[in-house]
């Protein structure tokens, strides 16, 4: 890739951690809608990508990806860790390090991405953040308090305490990672989830990693292909294009790709059939 074509892109941040430690609630507080309470039983069943526009002084934005904490979804967590620049490890201060916390640490380490720890539910009377920090040390997460390099913040998704600090840490870390992509090439990215929607057909949520995805582009996603009929941003608003590190809903694929499939723009339908067919 020609380095002169690379420009700054937002960080992709995946939220991981044990079931019910408050990942979705945290994301929820970082944006403003209310996803956690609208979920079936409050259990995240899929990976969802949400773009939170962080209004720090420099107007930076961060793309957040939520993952399920349930034991059955370890593959999804691994997938989330793979497409991310930074992992936010959420640990509930009243519950401490648990099995899926440890699995999340392993996935982040395997993907070689920096971890930022969010010690959540700090509003609870039984919260014990120093215990959490000691437990993390046992799993080789050495926080700054212990002379290590891993940043941590005490937060409450409920009261909003610490959220600004967390965002500032993420923004600073992203600066040091110097994340760039070429927005002017043909788009390529990863399917985060896909579902059939009545009246729309296959709707794939994709994270654009390079290039700019546009309405009218011919895309291949796994073994599916199609012409992009419409794009929706994370708020469901129709957009004409999607730049690197943004998540978009892609409408126009002829069937459902699998989460984790690569999605890429090709020149024409012949090429699309060929690429989709050989997979
Ligand atoms: P899974 O996706 O199922 O793994 O759960 P999750 O980690 O996304 O947790 P979720 O956001 O669903 O929150 C679980 C429960 O903890 C809910 O009842 C939340 O209201 C509660 N909760 C989350 N954050 C806080 C917090 O900071 N303080 C308090 N007191 N409760 C919280
Ligand atoms: Na939950
Ligand atoms: Mg959740």
Image: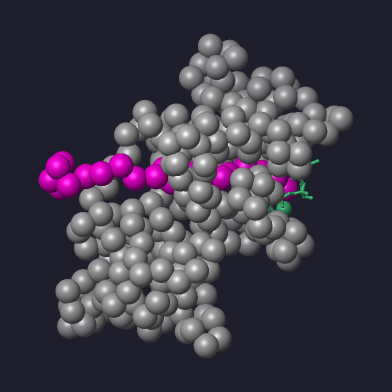
Does residue 240 appear anywhere in the picture?
A: yes
Residue 110: x %, y % from top left: 43, 39
Q: Give the range drawn in magenta.
A: 1-24
Residue 196: x %, y % from top left: 52, 80
- Colour basis: one colour
Residue 15: x %, y % from top left: 56, 45
Q: Name the residue located 49 percent from the left edge and 84 percent from the top edge.
A: 200
The single residue placed furthest to the top in the displayed view is: 147
The C terminus - image quarter: bottom left
Left/right of residue 247 with respect to residue 262 in the rendered view: right
The single residue placed furthest to the bottom in the displayed view is: 199
The single residue placed furthest to the right in the displayed view is: 125
Q: Name the residue located 67 percent from the left edge and 28 percent from the top edge.
A: 154
Is residue 14 magenta-colored?
Answer: yes
- Residue 258's place in the image compared with 68, above or below, is below
Left/right of residue 279 with respect to residue 26 in the rendered view: left
**Which residue is more in the foreground, 47 or 34?**
34
- Residue 92's place in the image compared with 231, above or below, is above
Quarter of image, res 254: bottom left
Quarter of image, res 253: bottom left
Q: Name the residue located 72 percent from the left edge and 64 percent from the top edge.
A: 38
Please tell me how many numbered marks the rendered image carries: 0
- Residue 251's place in the image compared with 27, above or below, is below
Does residue 263 appear anywhere in the picture?
A: no
């Amino acid at each position: 890739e020609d380095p002169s074509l690379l420009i700054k892109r937002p960080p992709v941040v995946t939220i991981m951690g044990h079931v019910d430690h408050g990942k979705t609630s945290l994301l929820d507080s970082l944006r403003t809608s209310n996803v956690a309470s609208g979920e079936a039983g409050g259990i995240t069943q899929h990976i969802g990508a949400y773009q939170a526009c962080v209004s720090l002084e420099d107007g930076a934005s961060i793309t957040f990806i939520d993952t399920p904490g349930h034991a059955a979804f370890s593959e999804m967590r691994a997938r989330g860790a793979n497409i991310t620049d930074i992992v936010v490890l959420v640990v509930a201060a009243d519950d401490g390090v648990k099995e899926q916390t440890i699995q999340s640490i392993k996935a982040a380490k395997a993907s070689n991405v920096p971890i930022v720890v969010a010690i959540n539910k700090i509003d609870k009377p039984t919260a014990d953040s120093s215990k959490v920090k000691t437990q993390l040390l046992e799993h080789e997460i050495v926080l700054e308090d212990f002379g290590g390099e891993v940043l941590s913040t005490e937060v409450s998704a409920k009261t909003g305490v610490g959220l600004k600090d967390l965002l500032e840490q993420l923004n600073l870390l992203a600066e040091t990672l110097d994340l760039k992509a070429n927005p002017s090439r043909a788009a390529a990215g990863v399917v985060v989830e896909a579902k059939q929607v009545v009246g729309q057909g296959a709707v794939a949520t994709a994270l654009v990693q390079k290039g700019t995805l546009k309405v009218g582009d011919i895309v291949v996603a796994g073994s599916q292909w199609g012409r992009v009929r419409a794009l929706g941003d994370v708020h469901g608003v129709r957009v004409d294009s999607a730049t690197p590190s943004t998540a978009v809903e892609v409408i126009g694929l002829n069937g459902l790709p699998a989460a984790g499939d690569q999605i890429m723009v090709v020149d024409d339908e012949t090429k699309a059939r060929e690429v989709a067919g050989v997979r």
